[in-house]
Every structure is written in C-alpha cells, then in structure tokens.
C-alpha cells in the first residue's frame, strides 16, 4: 500500500487553489461590481451603494435586446443543425472504412483546431467568392462549421460505446433500419445528443471573433458587449457580462447533469 505524502498533497492543493483564484477572481469581481454603484474618489474606485440600475438599464436598451434575440436565434439554429450533421458524420465514421473515416474526421475537426481568426477569414473569403452577403445566414453557417466538431465528438463517443449489439438485436427481431434508428439507437443516445446541443449552444452564444468576420450589419450579444467596451466603460457592461456568465454556467451545469445521466444509462 502506498503511503501518502502530506507535503506533496499540500503543495498540489495550494497550486490548485491559486489557479482557481486566478481563474474565478476576475469573474466574481465583475459580478460583484455589477450590483453596486461605483464612484471614483481621489482617483480610486469606491462602492457607493447596492443598486440594480445597470440591470434595469439593460432591459430598456433596445440594441442589447435585439442583439440578444439574434444570438439566441443563431445559437439555436446552429446547434440543432450541427446535431444533424454530427449524427451523419458519426454514423459514417463507424460504418465506413477506417481510412475514409479518419479522413472525414480530420476535415470535420480542422476548422475547430485552426486559430479562430484563420477560420473566420477563410469563411469570409469563401462567402465573397460565392457572392453570399454577410448577415444572419453567414453567421449561422460559420457557427455550424466551428461547433460541429464539438457535437460530433460527443455523439461519436456515445455511439461507439453502444456498439453494434443493439442494432443487430433490433434487426433480428424484424425492425427496419429506420425503426432501429428511431426507437433503439437515438433513445439510447439521448443524453449525449442533449449535452452536445447544449455545449454547442454555449459555444455559439459566446462566439465573437469568427462572428466579427461574417456578421455584416447583424449584431450578436458578444459583439454588442465588445462594441460597448470600445466606446468606454459603463455600468451596464458588468451587468451584461454577469448575465452572460450566469447563462453559460447554467448551460455547463446542465451538460454535467446530462453526462451523468448518460453514464448511469
């Protein structure tokens, strides 16, 4: 039996604590500041009093509400369409020859592995070559290209864990391939499908750099936040950042629940 090393455990715990503080301290500070009126006294920032005015101002800002609606539409459509493509790619990978499957997988992952600025610029050039004006459609296409690998990987792992036994048993009992897919395979993959869509939704909702290349006159919520920061600091920025943080955290929590449900299943 190996003996524990208290000193090493303490050092690792300290490093982990410092890392967590470095990661979350700026986020917590942003959230805390959003609930207080901040005034500058002799060059120093001071918290005056508790206030929800920044959040009330957000609700009355038509530009932010419009950007929020655009982000929700883009993230919803992009994540659902990515799920359809990911399912097709995953089924092809498990049924095709290994060399063809690996070649397809490399092509799927490449846009996600490239720096976002390269992916965004490449998509912009492609859209210009086919004379497709920048707008809501180009944003959705760009997001699909970027988030399909995430959904694909989640779906593929679950599909490989299922193996072929369920399919073979269903076919032996007289079910067609369509019935097998609809009533056997997809229900078994439900946790992976939902978690994949939620993860894709979160990534699409927060995507900024690629969107800047292909948005045109459309404005998503992250782009609106970025534009507000360029003009100058206003209290609504912290409030908006806090809401985005809470929304993303809720999606992440839901993904964790779905993954646990998939493991139990």
Image (spheres, helix red, strand yellow):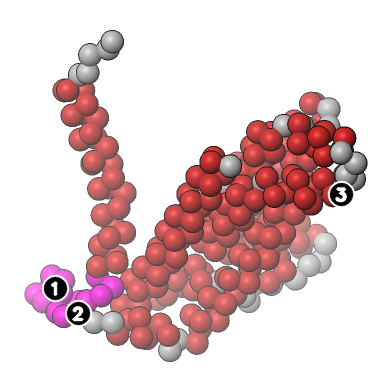
Residue carrying label 1: 46
Q: Which residues are magenta?
A: 33-49
Q: Earlier in the sequence, mark 2 or mark 3?
A: 2
Q: Position of residue 205 (x, y in %)?
A: 54, 63
Q: Viewer-proximal residue, 134 or 56?
A: 56
Q: CA distance from mark 2 to mark 3?
A: 58 Å
Q: Position of residue 137 (x, y in %)?
A: 72, 69
Q: Residue furthest front?
A: 173
Q: Residue at x 42, y 75 (%)?
A: 228
Image mark for residue 50: 2
Q: CA distance from mark 2 to mark 1?
A: 12 Å
Q: Viewer-proximal residue, 39 or 90?
A: 90
Residue carrying label 3: 178
Q: Earlier in the sequence, mark 1 or mark 3?
A: 1
Identify whether 108 is placed above or below 161: below
Q: Between tags 2 and 1, which lies in front?
A: 2
Magenta portion: prevailing SS class: strand
Q: Residues within 10 Å of mark 3 (few under 14, many from 20)?
A: few
């Amino acid at each position: 039996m190996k003996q524990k090393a208290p000193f090493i455990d303490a050092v690792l715990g300290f490093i982990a604590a410092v890392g967590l503080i470095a990661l979350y301290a700026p986020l917590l500070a942003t959230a805390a500041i959003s609930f207080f009126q901040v005034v500058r006294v002799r060059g120093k920032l001071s918290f005056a009093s508790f206030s929800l005015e920044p959040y009330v101002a957000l609700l009355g800002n038509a530009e932010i509400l419009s950007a929020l609606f655009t982000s929700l539409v883009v993230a919803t459509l992009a994540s659902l369409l990515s799920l359809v493509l990911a399912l097709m790619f995953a089924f092809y990978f498990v049924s095709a020859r290994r060399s063809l499957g690996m070649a397809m997988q490399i092509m799927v992952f490449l846009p996600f592995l490239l720096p976002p600025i390269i992916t965004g610029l490449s998509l912009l050039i492609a859209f210009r070559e086919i004379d497709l004006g920048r707008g809501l459609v180009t944003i959705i296409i760009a997001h699909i290209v970027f988030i399909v690998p995430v959904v694909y990987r989640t779906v593929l792992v679950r599909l490989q864990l299922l193996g072929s036994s369920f399919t073979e048993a269903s076919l032996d009992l007289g079910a067609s391939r369509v019935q097998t897919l609809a009533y056997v395979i997809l229900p078994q993959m439900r946790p992976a499908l939902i978690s994949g869509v939620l993860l894709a939704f979160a990534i699409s909702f927060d995507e900024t750099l690629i969107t800047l290349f292909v948005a045109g006159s459309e404005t998503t919520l992250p782009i609106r936040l970025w534009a507000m920061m360029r003009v100058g600091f206003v209290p609504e920025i912290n409030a908006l950042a806090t809401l985005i943080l809470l929304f993303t955290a809720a999606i992440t929590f839901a993904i964790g629940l779905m993954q646990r449900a998939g493991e139990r299943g």
